[in-house]
């Protein structure tokens, strides 16, 4: 129950990090909680009440902007298994994309969660990638998201590593130009333009 409560708190923190707890985001968390509660034995009413109370507290705190990422992640890092940490991250990614927009603050918080929980950035990118194909992303330079981080390019990477990341991204998004979904094709064109710009900026 403690891991579940912290997972819910983490997801609500991400949902509220763009300044607004969207209804679609709340539904994702609520459905997750229902699924979790379905695993609890019917006679264990105390555990159900414990989780429901934690959910209510987390919702109130997140709605009022009173959640702090570091303490939540520190607690999860201490008591959660690696599998549970990735489950928590997966829920947060689903919450981020629930409203159809990848807000720069939500993406920033997801990056911080990966770092604070000591998770593999590559695994995170694989988890995030399908969602990026359908959401709207603010790519407007310095006022938008970190464009390098969006492609898994980190500070301190060598030119060879950057070139590899850009080549992988180009191959991936090129394949989506053939999608039957016009929204996915449009996003692929947008991302390929971004990749070309980064190639010029970072590799000359």
Image (spheres, rainbow, N blue to C red):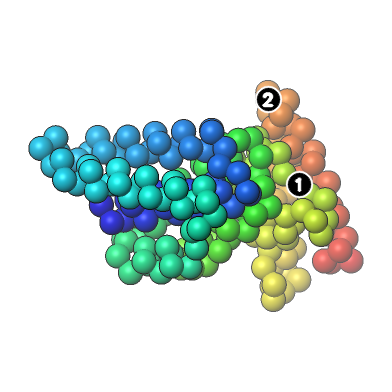
Q: Secondary structure at mark 1?
A: loop
Of labels 2 and 1, earlier in sequence is 1
Residue 99 placement: quadrant: top right
Query: Measuring 10% from the left and 37% from the top, which residue is drawn there?
Result: 43
Q: Nearer the viewer, mark 2 or mark 1?
A: 1
Percent x, y for residue 106?
61, 52
Residue extending farthest to the left is 43
* Label ID, residue 181: 2
Query: Measuring 32% from the left and 61% from the top, which residue is drawn there?
Result: 80
Above or below 38: residue 122 = below
Residue picked out by circle 1: 138
How far apart are labels 2 and 1 at the CA level? 21 Å
**Depth order, front residue of 124/40:** 40
Percent x, y for residue 188?
74, 38
| Residue 195 seen in render | no
Mark count: 2
| Residue 138 seen in render | yes
Q: Badge 2: how crowded within 10 Å, few (<14), some, or many (20+)?
A: few
Percent x, y for residue 29?
43, 40
Residue 156 placement: quadrant: bottom right
Percent x, y for residue 109?
58, 58
**Depth order, front residue of 61/126:** 61
Query: Measuring 78% from the left and 49% from the top, which residue is drawn there?
Result: 139
Q: Secondary structure at mark 2?
A: loop
Quick check: 134 left or right of 32?
Answer: right
Query: Measuring 51% from the left and 41% from the top, which residue is drawn there?
Result: 94
Image quarter of the C terminus? bottom right
* Label ID, residue 187: none
**Depth order, front residue of 179/140:** 140
Quick check: 174 left or right of 109?
Answer: right
Q: Badge 1: how crowded within 10 Å, few (<14), some, or many (20+)?
A: some
Above or below 159: residue 171 = above
């Amino acid at each position: 129950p403690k891991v579940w409560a912290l997972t819910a708190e983490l997801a609500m923190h991400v949902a509220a990090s763009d300044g607004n707890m969207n209804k679609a985001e709340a539904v994702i968390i609520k459905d997750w909680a229902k699924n979790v509660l379905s695993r609890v034995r019917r006679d264990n009413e105390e555990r159900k009440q414990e989780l429901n109370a934690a959910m209510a507290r987390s919702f109130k705190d997140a709605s009022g902007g009173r959640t702090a990422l570091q303490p939540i992640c520190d607690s999860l890092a201490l008591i959660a298994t690696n599998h549970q940490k990735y489950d928590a991250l997966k829920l947060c990614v689903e919450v981020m994309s629930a409203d159809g927009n990848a807000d720069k603050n939500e993406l920033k918080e997801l990056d911080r969660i990966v770092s604070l929980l000591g998770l593999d950035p590559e695994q995170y990118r694989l988890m995030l990638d399908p969602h990026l194909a359908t959401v709207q992303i603010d790519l407007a330079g310095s006022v938008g998201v970190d464009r390098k981080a969006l492609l898994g390019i980190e500070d301190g990477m060598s030119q060879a590593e950057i070139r590899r990341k850009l080549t992988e991204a180009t191959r991936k998004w090129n394949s989506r130009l053939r999608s039957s979904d016009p929204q996915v094709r449009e996003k692929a064109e947008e991302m390929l333009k971004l990749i070309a710009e980064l190639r010029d900026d970072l590799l000359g």
